[in-house]
Amino acid sequence: LKAGEPIRFGPEGEYGVRRGDWGGLDVGKVAEIGEENLVVHDPSIADTSYAFALSRLGDQNLNHVPTGILRQVERPTYDDAARAQVEQAREARKPDLQGLLRGKDTWTVA
C-alpha cells in the first residue's frame, strides 16, 4: 500500500479494491470494476474502520495480504492528554485549604 495511490495487486496489477455498495471494501478485477472506482489509499483517515477493513482483505491462504502503512494519524499521547486534563481541572477550581477545613464534608475516624 502506498499513500495517494489506487490499491491494486496481482502480478500485473489486474486486481483492485473498491468501496462496496454496503460501505465495506470489495476486491475485483480492475477491468470489470473500472480504474475510476478504485480506492485511493489514505492512511491519515482518522476513522479506524478503514484500516480495519484493509486488514481483513487477505485471503485464507495469505497469498494476498495488504502490506504497508494501514493507518497513520497524529494524536496526543496519553500522558499529554492526562496532564492537560489535570491542568484544566486545577484552573477550573483553585485549591482552597480554608474552605476544605471549614466545609461541611467531614469524616469521623474511629
Image (spheres, rainbow, N blue to C red):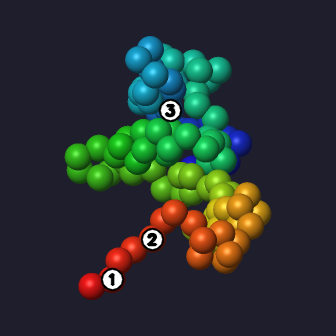
Secondary element at image label 3: strand
Q: Is residue 54 visible?
A: no
Secondary element at image label 1: loop
x, y percent for residue 60: 23, 46
Secondary element at image label 2: loop
Marks counted in the figure total: 3
Q: Which residue is mark 3?
A: 16
Q: Earlier in the sequence, mark 1 or mark 3?
A: 3
Q: Which residue is mark 1?
A: 109
Type of amino acid at the residue the image marks with label 1: Val
x, y percent for residue 40: 64, 35
Q: Is residue 46 visible?
A: yes
Name the residue at the left extreme: 60
**Residue 75, labelled with which disc?**
none
Q: Which residue is mark 2?
A: 106
Structural distance between the alpha carbons of marks 2 and 1: 10 Å
Q: Nearer the viewer, residue 52 or 13?
A: 52
Q: Is residue 51 above or below residue 15?
A: below
Residue at x 64% of width, y 20% of height: 36
x, y percent for residue 17: 49, 32
Type of amino acid at the residue the image marks with label 3: Gly
Q: Residues within 10 Å of mark 3 (few under 14, many from 20)?
A: many
Structural distance between the alpha carbons of marks 3 and 2: 68 Å
Type of amino acid at the residue the image marks with label 2: Thr
- Foreground label between 1 and 3: 1
Name the residue at the bottom extreme: 110
x, y percent for residue 13: 53, 39
